[in-house]
Amino acid sequence: MAASSKLNPDASGWQTATQLVHGGQLRSEFQETSEALYLTSGFVHETAESAEGRFKGETGGFVYSRYENPTVAMFEERVRMLEGAPAARATATGMAAVTIALLAQLEAGDHVVAGRALFGSCHYIVNDLLPRFGVETTLIDGRDLDAWQAAVRPNTKAFFFESPTNPTLEIVDIQRVSEIAHAAGARVTVDNVFATPLLQKPLSLGADVVAYSATKHIDGQGRCLGGVIMGAEDFINKNVFDLLKHMGPSISPFNAWVCLKGLETLTVRLERQCASADQMARFLIERPEVERVFYPGHDSHPQHTLAMQQMSAGGQIVSFELKGGKASAFAFQNALQLIKISNNLGDVKSLITHPATTTHQRIGAEARNELGIGDGLLRISVGLEDVVDLFADIDQAATGIRL
């Protein structure tokens, strides 16, 4: 059964919030209310002939949970509907999604152009892993359209970037960059994890492939790992599926089920989190300890206009730079009582991290400086707590900072 098959064909006309509750349902003969959890590695075939037909792809049905699974198929269909994508495949993690999305379109001798503002592990894939297998890569300032054009070579096959970026929330013009890529015969892959499919839909802006860490907002409660790749049916169900089937980075049925449950509340969670993040940005801008604030939804962001053209809200991530560098950043984090130190994001709990020593420590000081990731930079993933309590926690933690 292909991941893009319409498990609930009537769901296409529903609004997003309804699709996130009911989309992709595949009920068993017991007519369960909650989606069934199929914890099975394999599936029984009634005859040897039917087994042969399934393995050849001549007849429908599930073969092996490394390939496909009913619970996973429901998750894939629901998130596909949310994105408005032709097809989707789930992976074990967000980094599996990014890696497979790129490997599925590249071979030795190809060239990739990528925005330099990347999550640490994405930076490793582009800058270290791909060149080991004969793929050339060029890192550029993703905000600079001329830089994308100048980096194109005859063998350029893929563009890759985040928007907003992690952690300084730079914005890449998805439509214009996609036009440059397509003129060169290259595909565009966007890591859309910060915006989520609710706030930004890269495929509708011209991108070809979108990747998500379902670990973040889709689960949204810090329970499990997962990832999703979406794009055209032939690319997803051939290029991507072949790698998933043979390399094995498939999501577990249990994690897919947890992510299904997370999707049901995504709209209400994200609406609240975005509203709180907007208030958080305005609160931090006024504080004397803060050098600068990064938030696409605030007009102080240098790309605010572009962000609001591409996104329906500013997101739930706020980054800010404290005066006093690393010492201030560490003292502030250690004094927090409500906001927890963690490198995860998209959780219902507010989380804070120091990118220079966590998510981006391995790229080195020079690369961090180029990206504006200073020693005083902190990133907050705003949760569902009352902002009054969050502000009070920041107030008491800031009192210990000596400038």
Image: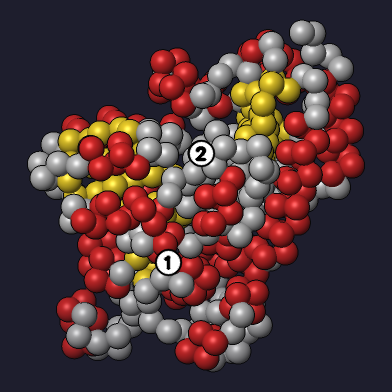
In this picture, is 44 found above or below 254? below
Residue 245 x/y as whole percent? 27, 61
Judged left or right of residue 167, residue 209 is left
Q: Which residue extends farthest top?
A: 403
At mark 2, the secondary structure is loop
In this picture, is 182 found above or below 297? below
Residue matched to label 2: 170
What residue is rendered at 69% in x and 11% in y?
324
Q: Quadrant of the C terminus?
A: top right
- Residue type of the residue flagged with mark 2: Glu
Residue 307 x/y as whole percent? 55, 50
Q: Are marks 1 and 2 in contact (CB under 8 Å)?
A: no
The residue closer to the viewer here, 37 or 107, is 107
Residue 359 shows up from this direction: yes
Residue 203 x/y as whole percent? 40, 64
- Residue type of the residue flagged with mark 1: Ser
Q: CA distance from mark 1 to mark 2?
A: 20 Å
Residue 311 x/y as whole percent? 56, 56
What residue is rendered at 67% in x and 31% in y?
293
Q: Quadrant of the N terminus?
A: bottom left
Residue matched to label 1: 204
The residue closer to the viewer here, 136 or 98, is 136
At mark 1, the secondary structure is helix
